[in-house]
Image (tube, coloured by chain):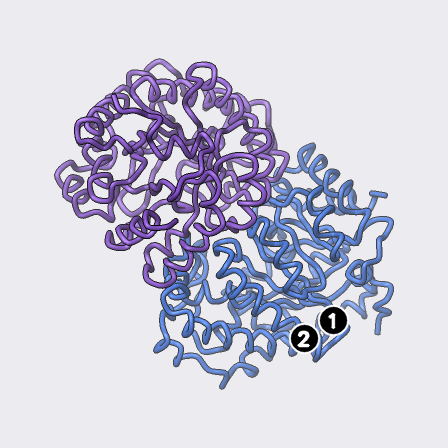
Chain colours: A purple, B blue
Amino acid sequence: MSDTTKKPMLRALKGVVQDSPPIWLMRQAGRYLPEYREIRARQGSFLDLVYAPDLASEVTLQPIRRFGMDGAIIFSDILVVPQALGQDLQFIEEKGPILKPIRNAEDLKRLSFENFAQTLAPISETLRLTRASLDREGFDHTTLIGFSGAPWTLACYMVEGGTSRDFINVKSWAYNDPASFEDLIDMLTQAVIEYCIMQINAGAEVIQLFDSWAGVLDHTLFARFVIKPTRRIVEALKEAAPHIPVIGFPRGCGRMALDYVQNSTVSALALDQQTAPKWAANVFQNLMPVQGNLDPVCLLAGGLAMQASAEDILAHLARGPFIFNLGHGVIKETPPQHVEELVQMVRGWA
Amino acid sequence: MSDTTKKPMLRALKGVVQDSPPIWLMRQAGRYLPEYREIRARQGSFLDLVYAPDLASEVTLQPIRRFGMDGAIIFSDILVVPQALGQDLQFIEEKGPILKPIRNAEDLKRLSFENFAQTLAPISETLRLTRASLDREGFDHTTLIGFSGAPWTLACYMVEGGTSRDFINVKSWAYNDPASFEDLIDMLTQAVIEYCIMQINAGAEVIQLFDSWAGVLDHTLFARFVIKPTRRIVEALKEAAPHIPVIGFPRGCGRMALDYVQNSTVSALALDQQTAPKWAANVFQNLMPVQGNLDPVCLLAGGLAMQASAEDILAHLARGPFIFNLGHGVIKETPPQHVEELVQMVRGWA
């Protein structure tokens, strides 16, 4: 086993300030890498790849081998949770996920935990294989990251039946019948807890909770359907696995991120690119480690713009407990060379 | 002429706190009203209606006659500005606007001011007709609102060629070649100034600047492409028409709204529904009047949820200079009865 006290990402999450900060990137395993596209071409569908532990593990390791990232986030998707609860899920090329929508208390009956653990078992296997490969290949500085969608964001996809611009269906349910909507959120909270514990048991050293649509709610629903379930999840994980930090990523929620930091009990906050680094340093980093937040389009652009943005982030945030990342996932058109340059820049910063 | 000092919306914009606040709703003239759908069915395309002053004025007046709103926002669209600069524009039913994209310095040459004033002349006529009708029909409490998209948001549509999820093209241009992108922003700044002055000359008593996509930028680009052009516009309007207040609506920009309030020189801030009313009261309303911010989905839902949300907003914001509104436009499925109930509730509040 690797010595976790030496892993820069885990050290940052304990509040340690390091000469140069650790770095990983959301969606670092994916279509911008030719070695990923090669495996995808052989394997067929995106979901087939997610549920094939040997290939998913291979894909997880690709950016580690190429760039030496400090974090290896498991190649998977947040929508495996609704699928494991029995909701029909497909990924349509260039269109994204399509789910058979769940719109009311009656529809909730279609969901169950019956096949939950069994459906997700291949993902545990991916984590085990990846952890073993990281050790075997000598990546003893790289932290293995498990993740889940947070209940609100999972509910958005489940109720809308895919992505959405306005989230009318899910928000209408939440406004019109909060009690039955809370049944869905409660079920998802339980599911996320079980899924994260599975991932921790399989070797995940950190959990990141993605709440990608946290920013579409007013502050009352945000407190009830973002902060409250997140707190329940983090408290359950702290009881089951006290040493595993949880990074919360309530994307796009602006100033409500402060309520989240103060009430969700997460260990660290992931920042989107809308968050000014200076403000994040003064407000959030005084309370917990932070992670972020280069604009993915800035990484796509590269050159001077990327350099200036990354320096701004480093100057404000790297003097506190900090993990360098993007504010959202890597865009598929990104030249791998830009990622290489960014990693060099962050490594060279002091 | 009506006595503008008695109009509740203008009084709120001067900082006056009133027993019950004025109310109007973004997109209050539109598809949720049967009388609007009737005119649309006769007229044909959305753009035909925008450029038909008698009908556009009629549609502008519909929600005033039905609900007695304190503000009448002219029925139009922000994309008339790119169209008047020579960019090809169509609206496809259920899909939204399609523009022939402008992606670089070369493409900029396709734009010009040659037909600008002439193209927009019908909209001035709509304002004149509406102002006359408001006076004639005795709506002497109703303020006539002109509006424009702000340069950044117009650029988003012009470069992406329509709506977008990720704004990769417009942001890439801004990152890769900020000098030529600034040429586009400068041209739009000039266009918005001219267009707003036209509207003021035609009777607009307030201008609202819609920066719907202000929230997709990091803080550096936000300062350069949102705050800076907005400040230039507001300063030019103050010089041309010192008594006309300008409401800025930098939607979705979270905590950066504070930079906007402190630096853009707008007269008032429109809030999106993500902004917690209590925070807005403490932070923004101490600096300027505010407007907002009921979630349009909450208006769609109606009932107890709407009542609770509206009360929360009123309790925190109506004791300062305040205009009640939504956090975004009325959704087309909204029952008009919910709007009626909301207006009664705001009128009855004290």
Q: Name the element at disc 1.
A: loop
Query: Is residue A36 or residue B273 the one in the foreground?
Result: A36
Classify residue B48 as left or right of residue A163: right
Tell me the residue that label 2 is attached to: B237
Q: CA distance from mark 1 to mark 2?
A: 8 Å
What kind of residue is marked 2?
Answer: Leu
Check the image and report above or below for A207 versus A300.
above
Does residue B88 appear anywhere in the picture?
A: no
Nearest to N terminus: mark 1 or mark 2: 2
Q: Residue drawn 73% across and 60% down? A: B71
Residue B314 position within the rendered picture, expressed as x and y whole percent measured from the top left:
76, 43
What kind of residue is marked 1?
Answer: Ile
Residue B159 position within the rendered picture, expressed as x and y whole percent measured from the top left:
40, 66
Quarter of the view holding residue A171:
top right
- The crowding category of the residue bearing disc 2, from other C-alpha atoms within 10 Å (few below 14, some 14 to 19, many at least 20), is many
Quarter of the view holding residue A180:
top right
Residue A143 position within the rendered picture, expressed as x and y whole percent measured from the top left:
32, 31
Query: Is residue A11 or residue A219 the one in the foreground?
Result: A11
Quarter holding the N terminus of chain A is top left
Tell me the residue that label 1 is attached to: B244
Q: Are marks 1 and 2 in contact (CB under 8 Å)?
A: yes
Residue B105 is tagged as none
Q: Residue drawn 53% across and 24% down? A: A231
Classify residue B72 as left or right of residue B252: right
Q: Name the element at disc 2.
A: helix
Kindly identify which chain the residue marked by label 2 belongs to.
B
Q: Residue drawn 56% across and 52% down? A: B253
Query: Is residue A43 or residue A274 the one in the foreground?
Result: A274
Does residue A332 appear anywhere in the picture?
A: yes
